[in-house]
């Protein structure tokens, strides 16, 4: 279902992230005031793909990538699903795959950061057992809305 992303996927990673952000976060990043920072996003994806210990999983769809999940040994760093595929379980499947990989690496507690105003994502994370902490930080992209940290115990699999 998932495959490792490569440098050849850079444009598709940025494209999927832009589609998902416009659909889910247009109220936070109104595109007429805060155009999607394509160049900066491409540069960030290039760094993530080359970072030791970071992995980016993707799934190919009919019109490009339909899901991406970037993670490291203990953090789910990015998750995006094509808005045309919302509600099909792709996000849950990607999260489960990431948590399984973290478990195999010996991690017992996973974390992620989510925009406070990303209500759809927060509902999903909480439904899947993630719990918000008191930790807050400004997002890196203008207008720098608040992100909050979530954590989740990873159920240990039978290895």
Image (cartoon, rainbow, N blue to C red):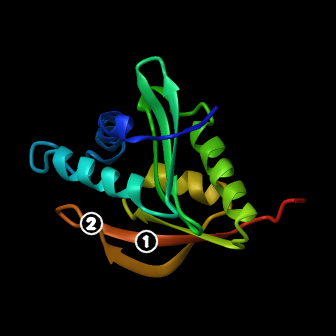
Which quadrant is home to the N terminus? Answer: top right
Tell me the crowding category of disc 1: few under 14, some 14 to 19, or many 20 or more residues within 10 angstroms, Cα based: some
Q: Which residue is mark 1?
A: 148
Camera-side residue: 127 or 71?
71
Classify mark 2: helix, strand or loop.
loop
Task: Say whether residue 151 is left or right of residue 147.
Answer: right
Q: Is residue 106 above or below residue 34?
A: below
Task: Say whether residue 108 is left or right of residue 138.
Answer: right
Q: Residue furthest left?
A: 33
Residue 28: % across, % down: 26, 54
Q: In the rendered image, which quarter is residue 19 located in? A: top left
Residue 109: % across, % down: 66, 73
Residue 56: % across, % down: 49, 49
| Residue lying at 68% horizontally and 56% vertically, measured from the top left | 101
Camera-side residue: 17 or 101?
101
Q: In the rendered image, which quarter is residue 117 located in? A: bottom left
Q: Which residue is mark 2?
A: 145
| Residue lying at 32% horizontally and 51% vertically, measured from the top left | 46
Classify mark 1: helix, strand or loop.
strand
Tell me the crowding category of disc 2: few under 14, some 14 to 19, or many 20 or more residues within 10 angstroms, Cα based: some
Q: Is residue 81 above or below residue 33?
A: above
């Amino acid at each position: 279902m998932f495959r490792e992303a490569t440098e050849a996927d850079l444009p598709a990673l940025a494209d999927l992230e832009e589609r998902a952000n416009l659909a889910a976060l247009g109220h936070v990043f109104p595109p007429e005031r805060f155009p999607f920072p394509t160049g900066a996003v491409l540069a960030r994806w290039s760094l993530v793909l080359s970072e030791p210990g970071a992995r980016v999983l993707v799934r190919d769809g009919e019109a490009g990538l339909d899901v991406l999940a970037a993670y490291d040994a203990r953090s789910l760093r990015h998750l995006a699903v094509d808005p045309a595929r919302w509600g099909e379980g792709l996000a849950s499947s990607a999260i489960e795959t990431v948590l399984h990989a973290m478990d195999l690496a010996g991690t017992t507690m996973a974390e992620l950061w989510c925009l406070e105003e990303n209500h759809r994502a927060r509902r999903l994370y909480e439904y899947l057992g993630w719990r918000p902490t008191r930790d807050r930080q400004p997002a890196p992209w203008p207008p720098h809305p608040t992100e909050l940290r979530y954590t989740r115990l990873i159920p240990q699999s039978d290895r």
